[in-house]
Amino acid sequence: MLSSLVSNGQQPASCRSELAVPWWSFTKTLLAATALSLVRDGRLRLDAPVRDQPFTLRQLLRHEAGLADYGELADYHAAVANDEAPWSVDEMMQRLEGARLRYSPGTGWRYSNVGYLLVGRLIEQVTDLSLEEAVARYALMPTGLSNVYFAKTRADLRDSCLGNQSNYDPGWVYHGLLIGPISQAALFLDRLLAGHLLPAGLLQEMQEAKTLGSPIPGRPWITPGYGLGLMLGPIEGGFTLCGHTGCGPGGVLAVYRICDGGASACCAVFDEGSSEGSVEALVVEKLLQALR
């Protein structure tokens, strides 16, 4: 198990030399932050229809666009388990019938990696940069992050904490898979939520959540919700837990922040072979200890 803690904006300098870990779906938080930076700059609008589509950027970021997810395809999981080469985006979308909306945008909620694939494409179209360049320019560099990049080959993951045990091809993550030190994941979320990247009004909109109903067994939220690239909601003790969890072959990463008055703590935990809920519980435990 690897962990990193940022307490009141401070992080031990010794964290900087650690091995990289795959950030899995915490990548969505970086994509959302990049897109919102473009909203801040007037280059995108949250509530205007995305080009030639019936949904908005806000609906994409909050999983309310009506899109399905390739994770529901049994063939997808079988292909990953068999170490096959990733399908092309066109093949994946064809197998999924990805262009067919499952509900009218804004009337439901369904977690969708396809939605974030479209967010990434929108970022590239607006900036005329590759997704890697755009995320570096609008999210990583402004928050002072280093040694964070998109994994593109199997070798990239073998150079991470997963080592030679991993033969996973990151091409199976269609919105892109960031990889980097766990300390940098904690530092990014802390600086993002502390207001180092986005203006206060836009940061508040990022944390306006779609309530997802009753508690989820084994997960920490009393009322789970999803904002713009953020999983958030109240937990026991009167705190709001805000961040994102991601999982994939080889491990789970959970990165979350809580505040208590003027004090704050942000923690990232990566663990192999654990459930999402158990890693989230470790994060909550470390966060509460840091605020005592």
Image (tube, rainbow, N blue to C red):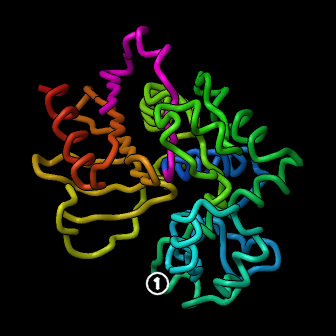
Residue drawn at x 46%, y 27% is 187
Say which residue appears at 76% left-offset and 50% top-offset: 42
Across and down, in percent, residue 72 comes to 50, 79
- Does the segment drawn in magenta span residue 96? no
Q: Three-letter amino acid code at disc 1?
A: Gly
Q: Nearer the viewer, residue 235 or 1?
A: 1
Say if residue 195 shows up in the picture: no
**Disc 1 designates what residue?**
108
Q: Which residues are magenta?
A: 1-25
**Residue for point 38% across, 56% down:** 231
**How many discs mark residues in the rendered view?**
1
Image location (x, y in percent) of residue 36: 63, 50
The residue tagged with tag 1: helix, strand or loop?
Answer: loop
* Residue 7: in magenta span: yes
| Left or right: where 179 falls relative to 92 | left
Q: Quadrant of residue 171?
A: bottom right
| Position in image of residue 268 (x %, y %) | 36, 35
- The residue lying at 27 percent from left, 36 percent from top is 259
Quadrant position of the C terminus in the picture: top left
**Closest to the observer, 286 or 54:** 286
Q: Quadrant of the N terminus?
A: top left
Q: Residue furthest right?
A: 128
Task: Give left or right: position of 136 versus 282.
Answer: right
Q: Is residue 105 above or below residue 120?
A: below
Farthest residue toward the top?
Answer: 13
Residue 276 in sight: yes
Please provide percent x and percent y for residue 100.
67, 89
Counting other residues with Cα less than 10 Å from the Cα at mark 1, is it few (<14), some (14-19), or many (20 or more)? some
- Residue in front for this viewpoint, 68 or 83: 83
In this rendering, the answer to whether 135 lies above or below 116 is above
